[in-house]
């Protein structure tokens, strides 16, 4: 009998080594020195070379004066420089402050300021924005600049330098800034590196989640959080990760799903990350056909896009050993379509859905390999306990009763950066243990399978990214002519949800192009590109609740009814 068809039961408890993230990579270097750790457009980097690059970058950071506890901002897509820098920061006991490169300039100012960053790494494409953000933050810190051509295979690098790369040859142009290539050469080989010390209470990584009040929150995560996730995830997957296997790593490194699953989990087990800087349906299909990755992980929009890509028609995808979906709810109908697509293309697997929050790095629950229950997001990872409680209380509800999902386990964050009030609201002590209150509604059945229903807090998920309406409303409302606004998510076949804003102008104010343009400019300057509303509708008034608040649920219902009718 095919062993992959044997019923699988994950262990309830795992032993987590007291090692830093980079020590986990070092262990793989010792076991599989010549095997590839990552691949970038066909150029492979072995575990031995990877650790050499980490050490070189760590010495350069140390020579710059970066020390344990200092933050370094990484504002990058999935490129070798980003991965090398992330682990080099960890190597010297510093803090990796992971930021979306499409963040608005004002957002980057906030990320740099709240983390007190000592340096920032970004791509040449985003250099001007980073330079402006550093200036506005009033920080005299170096900007390190990554260039695609420095990591591409020679023929491709030359072609890139003569085309797209030519636009950025003058960067960096500010005193003290340098390319990543120059920077890593600047570290003296004699520069001493600190001893690697594991500390379960040390912030190793800061990821960001938008705040419901409009202010982003820095989520402080540890070495244990990431290492525990890497071990739990493979146990829950029920499929061995080892040298020779590959993951198409498209989910970005500034995202918990991308950094925790697509990158760290793969590297901790000696497999290989095939790095993709951004998602493009045609390129993704070409990578599948050419590279035959064993594992792919992404958001529903990525997998839905695969269903309609002509290049994949008739292709054999039997090389796939696992497909994992997170970042947004996977509808029963979309799962059915994806599973049918996999079967038609000879892949003997099903798409499996995970659930989690950045406050516990990413997924903490996964549908089992051999027991799908419609509507369920699966069972908790080892050492992770879920409960359903009556919202606003600690009262545990019986099986089948809907309430707030709370959880505890080794991936739970230390807290929100410089925000003890929000931390105390989200992480609460119950029976002497720390429990994460997710703000999500759901229930559990008699067998412990979890079912997600809806979010208690307002949040929109578009293309797998969390968008917080309050942040966008604050920006729109700052336009002098605006009385108030309301931002909602509207069902969208490609993005799952698209962002729509309703705007009411002050009494007596007539809508003009100047007002429209003013709102557009404010949004571009203060909101990440993926979160900017695709539609802005102007109304005389908006529906209100009995207590006078905008009835955003009613607007959502109306908008989604329009989509269904259209």
Image: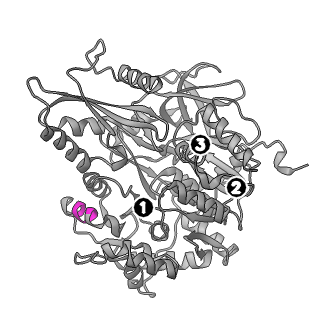
Q: Measured along the vertical axis of the image, is residue 175 above or below residue 478? A: below
Q: Which quadrant does the C terminus fall into?
A: top left
Q: Earlier in the sequence, mark 2 or mark 3?
A: 2
Which is closer to the viewer, label 2 or label 3? Answer: 2
Q: Quadrant of residue 456?
A: top left
Task: Name the main secondary structure of what is drawn in magenta.
Answer: helix
Q: Residue furthest left?
A: 508
Q: Residue at x 66, y 52 (%)?
A: 313
State the SS at label 2: loop
Q: Residue furthest right?
A: 1
In this rendering, position of residue 518 left or right of residue 233: left
- Which class describes the residues within 10 Å of circle 1: few (<14), some (14-19), or many (20+)? many
Q: Residue at x 52, y 66 (%)?
A: 197
Q: Position of residue 298 (x, y in %)?
A: 56, 49
User: How far apart are labels 1 and 2 at the CA level?
Assistant: 40 Å
In this rendering, position of residue 48 left or right of residue 493: right
Q: Which region is colored magenta?
A: 129-134
User: How far apart are labels 2 and 3 at the CA level?
Assistant: 33 Å
Question: Which residue is more in the foreground, 254 or 400?
Answer: 254
Q: Position of residue 147 (x, y in %)?
A: 40, 73
Q: Earlier in the sequence, mark 1 or mark 2?
A: 1
In this rendering, position of residue 370 left or right of residue 210: right
State the SS at label 3: strand
Is disc 3 in contact with disc 1, using a CB cutoff of under 8 Å?
no
Q: Residue at x 48, y 67 (%)?
A: 79
Q: Disc 3 designates what residue?
A: 364
Q: Measured along the vertical axis of the image, is residue 515 above or below residue 550? A: below
Instruction: Find residue 315 and name its label.
Output: 2
Q: Disc 1 designates what residue?
A: 96
Q: Residue at x 61, y 76 (%)?
A: 46
Q: Measured along the vertical axis of the image, is residue 345 above or below residue 101? A: above
């Amino acid at each position: 009998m095919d062993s992959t068809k044997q019923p699988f039961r994950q262990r309830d408890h795992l032993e987590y080594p007291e090692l830093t993230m980079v020590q986990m990579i070092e262990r793989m270097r010792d076991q599989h020195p010549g095997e590839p750790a990552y691949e970038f457009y066909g150029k492979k980097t072995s575990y031995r070379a990877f650790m050499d690059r980490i050490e070189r970058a760590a010495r350069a950071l140390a020579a710059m004066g970066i020390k344990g506890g200092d933050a370094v901002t990484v504002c990058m897509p999935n490129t070798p420089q980003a991965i090398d820098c992330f682990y080099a920061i960890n190597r010297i006991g510093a803090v990796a402050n992971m930021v979306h490169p499409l963040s608005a300039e004002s957002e980057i100012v906030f990320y740099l300021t709240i983390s007190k960053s000592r340096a920032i790494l970004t791509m040449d494409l985003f250099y001007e924005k980073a330079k402006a953000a550093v200036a506005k933050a009033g920080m005299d810190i170096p900007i390190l600049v990554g260039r695609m051509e420095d990591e591409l295979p020679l023929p491709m690098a030359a072609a890139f330098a003569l085309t797209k790369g030519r636009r950025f040859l003058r960067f960096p142009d500010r005193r003290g800034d340098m390319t990543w290539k120059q920077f890593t050469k600047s570290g003296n080989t004699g520069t001493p590196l600190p001893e690697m010390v594991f500390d379960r209470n040390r912030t190793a990584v800061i990821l960001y989640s938008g705040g419901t009040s409009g202010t982003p929150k820095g989520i402080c995560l540890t070495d244990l959080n990431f290492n525990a996730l890497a071990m739990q995830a493979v146990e829950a997957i029920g499929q061995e990760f080892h040298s020779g296997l590959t993951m198409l790593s498209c989910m970005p490194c500034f995202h918990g799903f991308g950094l925790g699953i697509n990158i760290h989990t793969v590297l901790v087990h000696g497999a290989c990350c095939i790095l993709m800087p951004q998602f493009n349906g045609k390129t993704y299909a070409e990578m599948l056909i050419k590279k035959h990755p064993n594992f792919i992980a992404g958001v529903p929009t990525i997998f839905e896009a695969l269903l309609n890509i002509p290049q994949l028609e008739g292709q054999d995808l039997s090389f796939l050993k696992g497909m994992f979906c997170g970042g947004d709810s996977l509808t029963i109908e979309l799962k059915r379509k994806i599973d049918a697509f996999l079967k038609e293309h000879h892949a003997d697997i099903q798409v499996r859905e995970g659930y989690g929050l950045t406050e516990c790095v990413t997924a903490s629950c996964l549908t089992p390999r051999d027991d799908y229950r419609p509507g369920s997001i699966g069972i908790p990872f080892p050492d992770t306990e879920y409960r359903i409680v009556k919202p606003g209380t600690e009262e545990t509800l019986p099986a089948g009763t809907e309430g707030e999902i709370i959880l505890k386990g080794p991936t739970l964050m230390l807290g929100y950066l410089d925000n003890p009030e929000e931390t105390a609201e989200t992480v609460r002590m119950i029976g002497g243990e720390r429990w994460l209150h997710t703000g999500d509604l759901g229930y559990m059945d008699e067998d412990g399978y979890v079912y997600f229903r809806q979010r208690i807090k307002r949040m929109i998920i578009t293309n797998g990214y969390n968008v917080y309406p309050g942040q966008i409303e604050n920006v729109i409302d700052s336009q002098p002519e605006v009385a108030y606004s309301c931002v909602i998510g509207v069902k969208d076949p490609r993005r799952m949800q698209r962002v729509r804003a309703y705007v009411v102008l002050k009494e007596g104010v007539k809508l003009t192009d100047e007002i429209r343009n003013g709102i557009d400019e404010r949004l571009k300057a203060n909101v990440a590109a993926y979160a900017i509303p695709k539609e802005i509708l102007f109304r005389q008034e908006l529906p209100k609740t009995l207590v006078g608040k905008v009835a955003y649920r009613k607007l959502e219902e109306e908008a989604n009814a329009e989509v269904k009718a259209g």
